[in-house]
Image: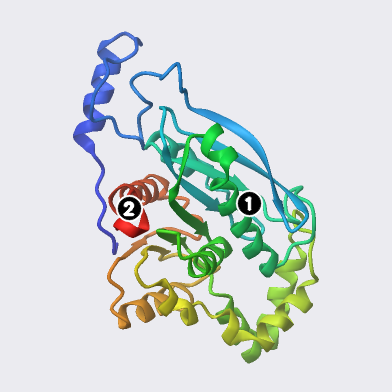
Amino acid sequence: MRHAYRYRNALIAITLSTVAGAGCQTPAPRADLDPVFMDPPAVDRAYPPAMEPVVIRSQGAKLSGIVYVAQGPGPHPAVILLHGYPGNEKNLDLAHVIRRAGWNVLFFHYRGSWGSEGRFSIEHAIADAHAAVGFIRSAESIRKYRTDPDRLAVIGHSMGGYVSFEVLAGDLRLRCGASLAGANLGKFGELAQQSAEFASQLAYYIDDANAIVGAAGQAAVARWMAHAPNYDLRRLVPRLAGRSLLLIGAEGDTILPLDQHHEPLVEALRETGHGDLTVETLDSDHVFSSRRIALAYIVVNWLNNRCKQPLADG
């Protein structure tokens, strides 16, 4: 297994023994509570944690979303959590963990997906993610959710990983970006050029996503084939300089194999001497089914260690 990760066995043992010895009573508050495993020792009654439904407007379309509001007066740093295609794995367990660590989290559905208005496309998804960043920076978010507009991170899974780096490259105020088993759509275009069978299978996968309303699979694949270099994330590497990046790959990923999507981008970043790059690989599948706790630790530690300072001070 190629990752630096260890469970906090002593902390877990202390917690379990405390609960067992208390006869199901609430454990005494501790200063070193672990947000991955433990709830806050006390609730801030004036500023409790909350979950608020929101509507984000993107180029005239209404996108459905949720803000996970951290407890305390803030201002809180914030994460925009981007799902993949079609978004069956929404990573909302990470949203709760990140909130317990003191961050607000905005999760939303791109237009044309899961009930959001409009039609889905990659270009629309990127524009929608920019709209989500604008929402988090809005006066409403600052006032209502106690958000710090200068401390933001974008975290995307699968196709959302692609979107996260597109958004990061296009917004110089963003401090941090993460890709979890991320896709490189340019690679899809290359593979489709080389194999008509692969192109057909990819088009079928797009058409088979019942939660998505958007362009037909053949049209989408044809666009990626015709413009593969423009969809290759490696072209963005120079524009990602100065930002903190996290890339997590999955060794058992059969949907986006490491050697086709994760590793080439990591190599391109390392070749340029990117100075703030965290790379992890977990022995799991595309959605990290067997390593959700490990995934949570990596993400939270990266956020807390690399992303709490505004970009100008980082």
Q: Residue 160, how many percent across, how many down?
A: 56, 61
Q: Type of residue at label 2? A: Trp
- Secondary structure beneath dot 2 equals helix
Looking at the image, tell me whether mark 1 or mark 2 is earlier in sequence order. 1
Closer to the camera, 13 or 265? 265
Quarter of the view holding residue 128? bottom right
Looking at the rendering, in which quadrant would you find the N terminus? bottom left
As drawn, 259 above or below 115: below
Name the side, left or right, on which 68 lies relative to 72: right
Q: Residue 307, how many percent across, how many down?
A: 35, 53
Closer to the camera, 282 or 77? 77
Name the side, left or right, on which 197 lies relative to 301: right
Residue plotted at (58% across, 54% down): 83
Q: Type of residue at label 1? A: Asn
- Which residue lies under the disc numbered 1? 88
Residue plotted at (48% across, 34% down): 146
Mark 2 residue crowding within 10 angstroms, few (<14) / some (14–19) / many (20+)? some
Q: Residue 266, how many percent across, how many down?
A: 37, 75
Residue furthest front as drawn = 139
Residue furthest left as drawn = 10
Residue plotted at (76% across, 73% down): 217
- Which residue lies under the disc numbered 2? 302
- Secondary structure beneath dot 1 equals loop
As drawn, 92 above or below 72: below
Name the side, left or right, on which 11 lies relative to 310: left
Quarter of the view holding residue 141? top right
Q: Residue 254, how many percent across, how many down?
A: 52, 68
